[in-house]
Image (spheres, grey):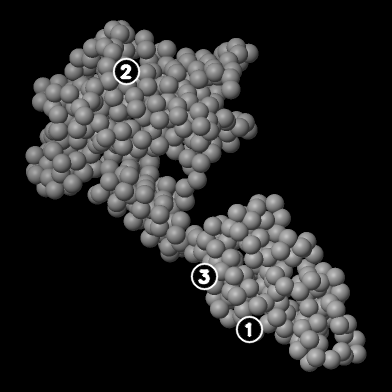
Amino acid sequence: MQLTNKIHFRNLRGDVFGGVTAAIVSLPLALAFGVASGAGPVAGLYGAACVGFFAALFGGTPTLISEPTGPMTVVITTIIASLTAANPDQGLAMAFTVVMLAGIFQIIFGVFKLGKYITLMPYSVISGFMSGIGVILIVLQIAPFVGQPNPKGGVLGMVQNIPVLLSKVNPAELTLGLVTLAILFFMPAKLKRFAPPQLVALIFGTVLSLMVFGDADIRRIGAIPTGLPTLQMPTFTAAQFTIMIVDGIMLGMLGCIDTLLTAVIADSLTRTEHKSDKELIGQGIGNLVSGLCGGLPGAGATMGTVVNIQTGASTAVSGLTRAIILFVVVLGAAGLTQSIPMSVLAGIALKVGVDILDWSFLKRSHKVSARGSIIMYGVLLLTVFVDLIVAVGVGVFIANILTIERLSDLHSEEVKTISDADDDILLNDEEKQLIEQANGRVLLFYLSGPMIFGVSKAIAREHAAMRDADVLIVDLSDVPMMGVTASLAIENAIKDAVDQDRQVFIVGAAGKVKRRLEKFGIMDFVRADRFLGDRTEALRQAVDLVKYNTVQANGTSSKGFSTEPSDVTVGS
């Protein structure tokens, strides 16, 4: 695997312009997310610069812009709140350690090539999870939006304190928040081509607060430390290390999902294909460095990526340019941001929360699928009011159970027992004649499609319904794979047939299917020469056995019946 991103300067003008534009878009969002998280605005800037630089350098999507995102901010906000509540002195440092752990886990996911599995999640779960994160982000902005400090207790605490917050509204800050939202929602598309609405809202809101509300009591960002960041060494307590590991895995997984979904959007805009495992390694390195520098965790950001591509970027030079500009802001120009009102940043973050909501699916989920709609709303509520991990775990579990049920019902229809010229499966003329000649004494047990564990019930049902017969033919010609549970069900059917002195043939078992049967010891019950590749040949031998058994039972020879079965040896 190539360590760094493939960088060239053939599109230098477009890449630099894309990087500058993306930096302008990123600045207000980084400040807003830093304040919203509780780590401070400088943490947002460090996160945007560190994750953006190293993800661009080592990632697998040349035009991807990585920075703190709404979902990542919501999760790290929860982590910071819980760790600082349990350990006020070291909680924030421990939260940055969780960011480092998230980066390490992302690197591990990439090294072990797990990228292609990360997003194998039902859309109803992803939609409910992302919409839940959007709701959390919106709710957490209510207090700063109306000019009040955040109450304790997270989302539930905020909801419970809404009446109190509304009774103590700061008119000046509420006005600034509403003006910010008005710019973000109603700024004409023509003007958006020249300046991102987030930057316009940030500048206009700040100027308005100084000129019109200069004498009002308005909460502002205040001075931001400039210069190089202070390195945050890994900090943890033995009692909370397990919790931090779980938080790191959750944060890393969310970053992977957020990034890879954005990478797919970048692919569709650039007509290219990203390298998911390499991208996860790049994101992991970025988050590891960000945690060391005291920055927020980041992921692929849809808004920044789209802006980057639309302004002409085509290589990782754009992401590096954007990160360098943000480094310059952190190192020397952070003092210019100290007058920004908190309510303006709250308005920007609130708009991000509204954008995260999956409005398209929310409006029509009940029309598309009732089950999918229930899962989506269930995950949304669990995300908001219970826990992010619980929400995803429960949603994926239920969605997979429902999917397995549907697949099992579908494949169960392809489990059939046939003792006459049945039209349920496609038999050639000779096979139909042979089954008619057997007069119900040959039972064809036909299976088709993947034999997942949910099909075992259908196998057992057909097995229990088997009529008396002298010969059982198990046809696996159309079975590409067999799970353990289905294999056990087939083994039970074969054992039962042998115990009842039936002769058993197995047709079409090849490759993995045959090896699975051999590992289950089927060769102990069925001789090697009874494993056939052709169903017609199996039926011929089965009919000869039936004729031979009939003659032996009658004790006499009959016209057309040989006294010895042709090419057949009796006994299992």
Q: How packed is label 2: few (under 14 Cα within 10 Å), some, or many (20 or more)?
A: many
Cα distance, mark 1 to mark 2? 71 Å
Q: Which marked residue is nearer to the observer: mark 1 or mark 3? A: 1
Question: Image point 76% across, 74% down: which residue?
Answer: 570
The secondary structure type at the circle numbered 1 is loop
Q: Amino acid at mark 1?
A: Arg
Q: Is residue 483 above or below residue 208?
A: below
| Mark 2: secondary structure | helix
Judge depth for marks 1 and 2 and give the one in front: 1
* Residue 508 position by quadrant: bottom right
Whether 570 is drawn above or below 80: the answer is: below
Q: Nearer the viewer, mark 2 or mark 3?
A: 3
Cα distance, mark 2 to mark 3? 54 Å
User: Counting other residues with Cα less than 10 Å from the Cα at mark 3, is it few (<14), some (14-19), or many (20 or more)?
Assistant: some
Q: Earlier in the sequence, mark 1 or mark 3?
A: 3
Find residue 151 and report its horizontal and vertical position in percent: 13, 38
Decide: marks 1, 2 in contact (CB < 8 A)? no
User: 81 or 424: which is nearer to us?
Assistant: 424
Disc 1 and disc 3 in contact, CB within 8 angstroms: no
Q: Quadrant of residue 22?
A: top left
How much space separates mark 1 and mark 3, taking CA atoms? 18 Å
Q: Which residue is mark 3?
A: 457
| CA neighbours of label 1 inside 10 A, class few (<14), some (14 to 19), many (20+) | some
User: In the figure, 61 relative to 257: above or below?
Assistant: above
Picture coordinates of residue 398 (x, y %)?
40, 58
Position of residue 397 measured from the top left corner of the image (x, y, whole percent): 40, 54
Q: Which residue is mark 1?
A: 467
Q: Residue at x 20, y 14 (%)?
A: 223
Residue 107 x/y as whole percent: 45, 27
Between 481 and 62, the residue placed more toward the observer is 481
Q: Which residue is mark 2?
A: 292
Residue at image location 31% in from the left, 44% down from the top: 388
